[in-house]
Image (cartoon, rainbow, N blue to C red):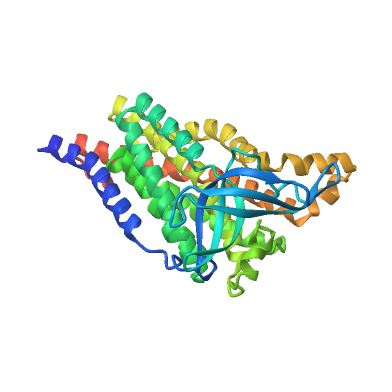
Amino acid sequence: MKQLQKRWGYHLPVLLCLILIGLLLWLPTGFEDALVYQESDIQPARVLSCDNSSIIDTGLVRSGEQRCELEIASGRFAGRTAGGVNLLNGSLEQDKLFQPGDTALVRINYDGEEILSVSMIDHYRVPGELLLAGLFCALLLLFARETGLRALLSFVLAILTIWKVLVPCFLKGWNPVWVGLGVVLLITVAVVTMVYGFDRRALAAISGCALGVAVTCVTGILFTNAFRIHGAVMSYSESLLYAGYQHLDLTQIFTASIFIGASGAVMDLSVDITSAVHEVVEKKPGIPWQEAVRSGMTVGRAALGTQTTTLLLAYSGGFIALLMVFMAQGSPLETVFNLKYVSSEILHTVVGSFGLCTVAPLTALTSGVLLARGRTSALTGQPEAKR
């Protein structure tokens, strides 16, 4: 009977995860009929020819417009040809150029069956992205098999939760901190139970992770205010305001992004420590819970040495060009550290590392108490108060 309960507790999270994925796929975001997409159709189109005569080339950047002859690949206008316009703003970051044979993603403005205009959004990259995702899934399943399938399901659930719950709630003006905490807790429960099933290990890891994320959240709020960081420091945040969402509190969204970004590393460390403590308890069933906690602390100290560096590399990797600009211009470090976009990244890195430093002892404590203390009582039959 116990073996049956254990197997059921291990496989039940998969069923619940599949149910949640189905519900999230069905769940509307409320933004399906956004006004910007009325009377237009977004489809891939093959570039037949290009006219670059209106492009002003300065050697480094280009401006003007590129005109292309397009064959629409799908949708209500599939097979029809039309002229498309690719506007160049002189920005290497945002501009793109097309060549005959390319596939472009285009927005078709129409009136009935008449095509009014076609604007070229960007290169059509979905097939390549699907190929890359397929290779990733195949490698994961080939290497990890059932565990890989569980990881893949939890990965899909996390993506859907962010896109279908987190982002719409932020846009609707819900409190970003509370929404972020709720989403992180949901994802944590889903991922950890997919690893362990419903048992004491899952409870220990989830408890430690939740406490660590809570500490990260409070620390992020305090130091965001202390550093006088406004949420507009986030990329594209001003575009969001200009799109009619002036009611949003960008600073709270920025604060939520701090603990959401660190939650993955926090979850990883909590699972590592819980697994280590569980292994110690399995090898030595009579171990006192205090000693199990100390073992978890030892594992946590070793893991922290690499986890904090992992956060640093993850956040700084996207800012290599910015760091090169600072060095090329000879900017003093004091000036660099006082710039708000640098301070915001310092917040992300240090506050996230602060969460890691706290989740290690907290998870060691929860796993030691839940795994060793319960096991000792079951073995000895003695009440905990007598130990």
Residue 124 rendering spot, x and y as whole percentages: 55, 44
Q: Nearer the viewer, residue 367 or 221?
A: 221
Callout count: 0
Please give left or right for residue 143 compared with residue 199 in the image: right
Task: Report the residue that reaches farthest toward the right.
Answer: 330
Task: Report the residue that reaches farthest toward the left.
Answer: 1
Q: Nearer the viewer, residue 137 or 40?
A: 40
Please give left or right for residue 200 compared with residue 244 in the image: left
Image quadrant in which the N terminus is located: top left
Q: Is residue 377 above or below residue 185?
A: above
Residue 231 rendering spot, x and y as whole percentages: 65, 63
Q: Residue at x 33, y 38 (%)?
A: 150
Q: Nearer the viewer, residue 67 or 15?
A: 67
Q: Is residue 124 above or below residue 89?
A: above
Task: Report the residue that reaches farthest toward the bottom.
Answer: 247
Q: Is residue 177 above or below residue 55?
A: below
Residue 302 rendering spot, x and y as whole percentages: 54, 30
Residue 160 rendering spot, x and y as whole percentages: 41, 52
Q: Residue at x 48, y 34 (%)?
A: 132
Q: Can residue 198 be spotted in the picture?
A: no
Q: Can residue 163 be spotted in the picture?
A: yes
The image quarter in which residue 301 lies: top right
Image quadrant in which the C terminus is located: top left
Please give left or right for residue 271 compared with residue 384 in the image: right
